[in-house]
Image: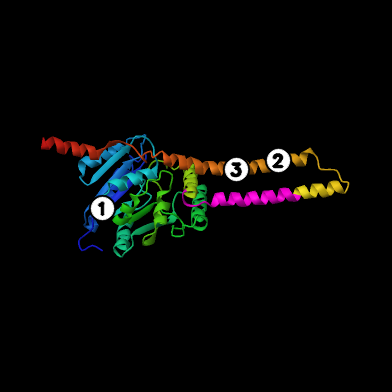
Amino acid sequence: MFEKRPYISIVTPAYNEAANLPLLWQRLSCVMERMNGSWEWIIVDDHSTDGTFEVIAELANQYPNIRGSRFSRNFGAHAAIACGLDHASGDCVITLAGDLQDPPETIPELVQKWRAGAQVVWAMRGHREGETTTTLGFAQAYYFVMRHLVGLKEMPPTGADFFLIDRSVVKALEGFHENNASLFALITWMGFRQATLTYDKQARVHGESGWSLKKKLKLFVDSITSFTYLPIRLMSYVGMIVAFVGFFYAVVVIVNALGGQPVEGWSSLMIVVLVVGGIQMLMMGVLGEYLWRALDESRRRPRYLIEASTFEERVTATEIKLR
């Protein structure tokens, strides 16, 4: 694809990874030195509560190819990746988590598939060390829904947090400004030439995952509402079924009344009211999710806000020298 060696950008979202980042730098630098090419490492601190940004700033002062930013609040991993993509200047960009669960030793294989012509290369999870049964079950359900119900069949069946995208894909992403969409699902939906490779996701070395159940549920709802109208279509089907059952029950009541049988009493009426009312509340909740996201997108709020950055420090230093 390139006559000369490509320039590679590596983007790492980090949340409370102060202990992991120096270890990741050691492994990452060894891998990239063996590849013998130019590269940069962009780390985005998602408003950590430990000394993550201090570690980033220290690394950036020691190594000129490291840059970092800190969010003004916790915007989430996908916003952190988007921030890194906005600042990346490589011919391709690799996203790599800061928790050491995604081995940087897989990077040469990603680059090899990219140089062979793929514009998106997914590092698909194989064996996952140290994960609970609940986490694995949620992941399986999520990717099943995304592939078979939402229709994103190119999405890796076991998921991918670790991937490479071409500069053309990065430029295409600049045209999207959605705040409530899964970045991974969006890249899958965009198309381009995609390839996958399998790796074993390792256990976390230090700290705990910030990927809470609340964030998982939000990602699930965001992914559904951003890429399909299936829940609304199902509401229509359920409405028709309930209406049909209601009319059928009315016919049964009328026939029984004409036949001299007493009309069923208060208990059966309350069951019908509660069931129909519950279905209606569920439908209103689904509509509310879509309406809220439409309102949120119409506000055009920024996807993230940067509180501090090593980018600014270097620009300021340059300006001082010029003066």
In the shown orientation, is residue 211 left or right of residue 320? Answer: right
Colour pattern of the rendering: rainbow
Q: Is residue 221 visible?
A: yes
Residue drawn at x 39%, y 56% is 190
Circle 1 residues within 10 Å: few <14, some 14–19, many ≥20 = some
- Tell me the magenta residue range: 226-248
In the shown orientation, is residue 270 left or right of residue 100? Answer: right
* Residue where numbered disc 1 is placed: 90
Residue 125 percent across, percent down from the top left: 42, 56
User: Is 247 in the magenta?
Assistant: yes
Q: Amino acid at mark 2?
A: Val
* Residue where numbered disc 2 is placed: 273
Q: Is residue 205 visible?
A: no
Nearer to us in this view, 294 or 72: 294
User: Is 233 in the magenta?
Assistant: yes
Mark 1 or 2: in front is 2
Q: Earlier in the sequence, mark 2 or mark 3?
A: 2
Mark 3 or 1: in front is 3
* Residue where numbered disc 3 is placed: 282
CA distance for labels 1 and 2? 60 Å
Q: Quadrant of the N terminus?
A: bottom left
Q: Amino acid at mark 1?
A: Gly
Identify the image quadrant of residue 309.
Answer: top left
Q: Amino acid at mark 3?
A: Leu
Residue 52 percent across, percent down from the top left: 32, 38
Q: Is residue 15 above or below residue 133?
A: above
